[in-house]
Image (cartoon, rainbow, N blue to C red):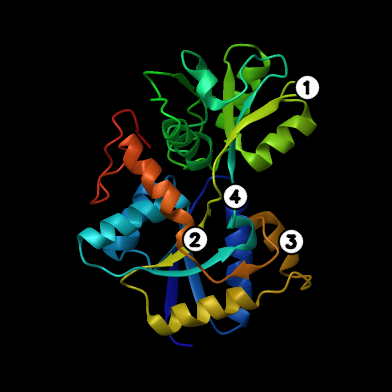
């Protein structure tokens, strides 16, 4: 098929090169010419997608929110292409120590809560939105101790969540916020203290999504989506790449799983309606 599809991905880990080098080689065997560029943060990637400097972007959920707002402000259409099976129906949790007298979120008034990085959907924006839903204003009713590891990576770096859990274990904070899957991981690793309890859990939400921008040739995007959806976990060439990317299958995209994050972004004043960054202490 004539033409090249240019993809943007954020280099949150060295394995990103292995993943997209491998997918690139495989896609070329299927007559799709794909190349990729790496970004140090999601903000520039979202801006370049909407400006047409890249054709498709492997977006974090927060990058999807920003790209959507930037595109809407310019009357530019974006097209969701695919997402991973592991991006669907996730939750975040607020965890306390076993001996804590905190029984529910409302008991955190006047206490200190640890979060991940300022731009982490799962370990900061969504859990703090959950606190707002029960009438607690972060920074006023609840002190927030933030662990800004990998700022600009939208929480793809697990360091902030891990440090929040360690602060809970050390007794430095009263609660810690993290994605549900990491709470299970940290419990197994002994990062969380024994018997740590969940006192709050967000509704389900979705995570990353592949997004095509205004410069993308629709025929190439169609073929790209078909090939991703057709990848088989049983294929010995693809399986190691799918494992690195953290999925067993690509799925058709859906957008309803981002509405909770849209509200969390508005509640925190992180972006405005036009996609401009408004968080005062955010420097990716």
Q: Which residue is mark 3?
A: 240
Mark 2 to mark 3: distance in Å?
20 Å
Residue at 65% x, 21% y is 166
Q: Which mark is residue 159?
A: none
Instruction: Indicate left or right for 101 with 156 as reference.
Output: right
Mark 3 to mark 1: distance in Å?
34 Å
Residue at 34% x, 52% y is 66
Q: Earlier in the sequence, mark 2 or mark 3?
A: 2
Could you classify mark 2 by the number of other residues whose Cα lies within 10 Å: few (under 14), some (14-19), or many (20 or more)? many
Residue 165 at x, y percent in the picture: 63, 25
Question: Element type at marker 3?
Answer: helix
Residue 252 at x, y percent in the picture: 55, 72
Instruction: Indicate left or right for 45 with 233 as reference.
Output: left
Question: Element type at marker 2?
Answer: strand
Question: Element type at marker 1?
Answer: loop
**Which of the 4 image quarters holds residue 243?**
bottom right
Mark 3 to mark 4: distance in Å?
24 Å
Q: Which residue is mark 4?
A: 90
Q: Is residue 8 shown to the viewer in this render?
A: no
Q: Earlier in the sequence, mark 3 or mark 1?
A: 1
Q: Quadrant of the C terminus?
A: top left
Q: Which mark is residue 209?
A: 2
Q: Nearer the viewer, mark 2 or mark 1?
A: 1
């Amino acid at each position: 098929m004539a033409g090249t599809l240019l993809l943007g991905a954020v280099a949150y880990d060295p394995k990103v090169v292995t993943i997209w080098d491998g997918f690139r080689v495989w896609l070329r065997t299927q007559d799709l010419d794909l190349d990729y560029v790496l970004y140090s943060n999601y903000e520039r990637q979202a801006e370049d997608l909407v400006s047409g400097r890249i054709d498709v972007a492997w977006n974090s959920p927060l990058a999807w929110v920003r790209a959507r707002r930037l595109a809407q402000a310019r009357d530019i259409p974006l097209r969701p292409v695919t997402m991973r099976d592991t991006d669907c129906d996730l939750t975040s949790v607020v965890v306390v120590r076993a001996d804590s007298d905190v029984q529910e979120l409302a008991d955190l008034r006047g206490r200190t809560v640890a979060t991940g990085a300022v731009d982490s959907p799962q370990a900061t924006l969504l859990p703090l939105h959950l606190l707002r839903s029960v009438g607690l204003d972060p920074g006023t009713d609840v002190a927030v101790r933030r662990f800004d590891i990998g700022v600009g990576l939208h929480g793809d770096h697990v360091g902030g969540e891990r440090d929040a859990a360690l602060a809970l274990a050390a007794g430095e904070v009263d609660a810690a916020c993290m994605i549900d899957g990491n709470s299970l991981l940290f419990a197994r690793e002994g990062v969380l203290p024994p018997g740590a309890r969940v006192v709050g859990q967000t509704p389900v939400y979705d995570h990353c999504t592949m997004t095509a921008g205004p410069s993308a040739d629709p025929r190439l995007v169609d073929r790209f989506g078909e090939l991703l959806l057709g990848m088989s976990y049983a294929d010995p060439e693809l399986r190691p790449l799918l494992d690195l990317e953290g999925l067993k299958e690509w799925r058709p995209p859906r957008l309803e799983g981002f509405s909770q994050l849209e509200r969390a972004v508005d509640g925190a004043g992180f972006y405005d309606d036009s996609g401009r960054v408004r968080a005062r202490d955010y420097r990716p």
